[in-house]
Image (spheres, rainbow, N blue to C red):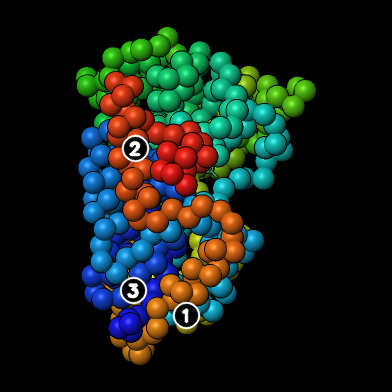
Amino acid sequence: MEKKHQVAVIGAGPAGLYGARELAQAGAEVTLFNRDIKPGGLAEYGIYPDKIAMKNGLRKQFQKILSTPNLQYFGNISIGDDADLSLADLRAMGFQAIFVTTGAQGTKWLGLPGEDLRGVYHAKDVVYFYNHLPPFSQQDFHFGSRCLVVGAGNVMIDIARYLIREAKVDEVTALVRRGPADVKFTKKELGYVAANLDLDLLDAEMQRVGENMRSVNQDPQAAKDFLLSALSKAAPKVSETKFSFRFLASPQAMRGDDGLLTHVDVENNDLILKGDATKPRGTGNIQALEADTIIFAIGDKVDDSFGLPTEWNEFIKDENPRFPQDGKSFELAGEENIFVAGWSRKASDGLVGYARKDGVNGAKAVLAYLAGLPKGESALSGLADKLASLSKPIVTSDAALRLYEVEKEEAEKRGVEEFKFDDNEAMLRAIGL
Ligand SMILES: Cc1cc2nc3c(=O)[nH]c(=O)nc-3n(C[C@H](O)[C@H](O)[C@H](O)COP(=O)(O)OP(=O)(O)OC[C@H]3O[C@@H](n4cnc5c(N)ncnc54)[C@H](O)[C@@H]3O)c2cc1C
Ligand SMILES: NC(=O)c1ccc[n+]([C@@H]2O[C@H](COP(=O)([O-])OP(=O)(O)OC[C@H]3O[C@@H](n4cnc5c(N)ncnc54)[C@H](OP(=O)(O)O)[C@@H]3O)[C@@H](O)[C@H]2O)c1
């Protein structure tokens, strides 16, 4: 068999899929491992459920990638310490480079009292739940009537959107540590929930924070105009949920009764200037808010049980990369042949298009590294022995392609736009595994 450079790509989200294609098209033999049965990562299990046209467009591209020559997909396989295969296993099989594109699977808990109460969640788990990713899809989330969502990014809006338009809870309050001029969501995204905005509460909140904003050279009226601008193209109201913002506020502790969240102690912040940027500074003034659900939508971190050293929210990159691309390092510190891209390189950063570009750039760094190495024997025979010993169904490219077809047929049968299996067993049965 013709020798080729052997590359293991770990994670089949946008970064891994587009990166794997770049590598395979350059002639490397690429083995793409994925924890989930279905490829796509957050493009499949993160993007809001009703953005069906966007997801279908991406699915078409992903299906094409699965059929790329030199590229083998192995879904339902986790890599890492205490996972199905370790990084050492991959090295022993003869993979010459390992490209980590596992996204940001760790949870950025803040270490506050009461994080273990029922009703306290992290956004990623909730997003996976309503996007039907097993096992989250089968877990019993408790969305009460008063919900707090921490953060002011697009993920906060997605969660608020789910609570307002699907769960139809009584109240949703976004807890934002800085002010209305520092929000990160777009006007378009806000439009999905703007019809539920409690305008009296917004007025009162703007009055409350206005003076502090002016003291850091922010314009309260411009910030309010931005929020109100979403009203002109707001999606029609489908629930009576009251949606409001609580600015300059950080949760400090969660309290409960009988294991269930009942209150969140929130500290008021002052906005201060640090250079050109605003920062929140706690005032020590704490108020208890009644709440039965709090969801932290504050970004994610990489999985620190993966088997690679992490610092803060990230794997530690080599600051002096041998093969920089666009001035960025895709190389892990102290590792000869491990590369990262996408949300594994920088957690919770950017959209699918950005992850795609990052995956391709990371692949270019891998190719530059491989250019200095002789080609290797296929790693696939060593892998086959190891996979056989795992006694679990492995989802190949053909099986994954079949799954797309089966889900499409099931949607047509049920007369719905999209259908996804909620559990792995049903998914595997449907593709004959
Ligand atoms: C709630 C939410 C909504 C979003 N909505 C949009 C949107 O509307 N439009 C848009 O353009 N972008 C959106 N994004 C951003 C977009 O989803 C990300 O930019 C992109 O998916 C990141 O790609 P990635 O490949 O780096 O990681 P991911 O998409 O997270 O993919 C990681 C992959 O790695 C696999 N994996 C994880 N751990 C392991 C392991 N140990 N072994 C093997 N495999 C593993 C996972 O199964 C997954 O398939 C959204 C993000 C979120 C969180
Ligand atoms: N529809 C879409 O296109 C869509 C949907 C979802 C996600 N995405 C993308 O996915 C990426 C991630 O989104 P994201 O919303 O998770 O991240 P994000 O945009 O970075 O927002 C994170 C929010 O959490 C706050 N935060 C961070 N740490 C905090 C803490 N310790 N305490 C309180 N608040 C804290 C941040 O406040 P500060 O600003 O003060 O740091 C910020 O408001 C973004 O690129 C986003 O655009 C896109």
What quarter of the picture does the N terminus occupy? bottom left
Compared across the picture, whether 153 is left or right of 85 comes to left
Q: Secondary structure at mark 1?
A: loop
Compared across the picture, whether 174 is left or right of 85 comes to left
Reading the image, the residue beneath label 2 is: 406
- Disc with the residue nearer the chain's start (1 vs 2): 1
Residue 220: give x, y in percent of width and height. 35, 30
- What amino acid does circle 3 point to? Glu
- Disc with the residue nearer the chain's start (3 vs 1): 3
- The answer to whether residue 203 is visible is no
Q: Which quadrant holds residue 184?
A: top left
Mark 2 or 3: in front is 2
- What amino acid does circle 2 point to? Val
Q: Relative to 415, is 159 above or below?
A: below
Q: Secondary structure at mark 3?
A: strand
Cα–Cα span, label 2 and label 3: 29 Å
Reading the image, the residue beneath label 1 is: 94
- Nearest to the observer: residue 295 or residue 186: 295
The residue at the point 68 percent across, 25 percent down is 261
Mark 1 or 2: in front is 2
Residue 430: give x, y in percent of width and height. 42, 38
- Nearest to the observer: residue 33 or residue 362: 33
Reading the image, the residue beneath label 3 is: 29
The residue at the point 50 percent across, 49 percent down is 300
Q: Which quadrant holds residue 405?
A: top left
Residue 415: give x, y in percent of width and height. 29, 21
Q: Relative to 351, is 326 above or below?
A: below
Q: Relative to 92, is 430 above or below?
A: above
- What amino acid does circle 1 point to? Gly
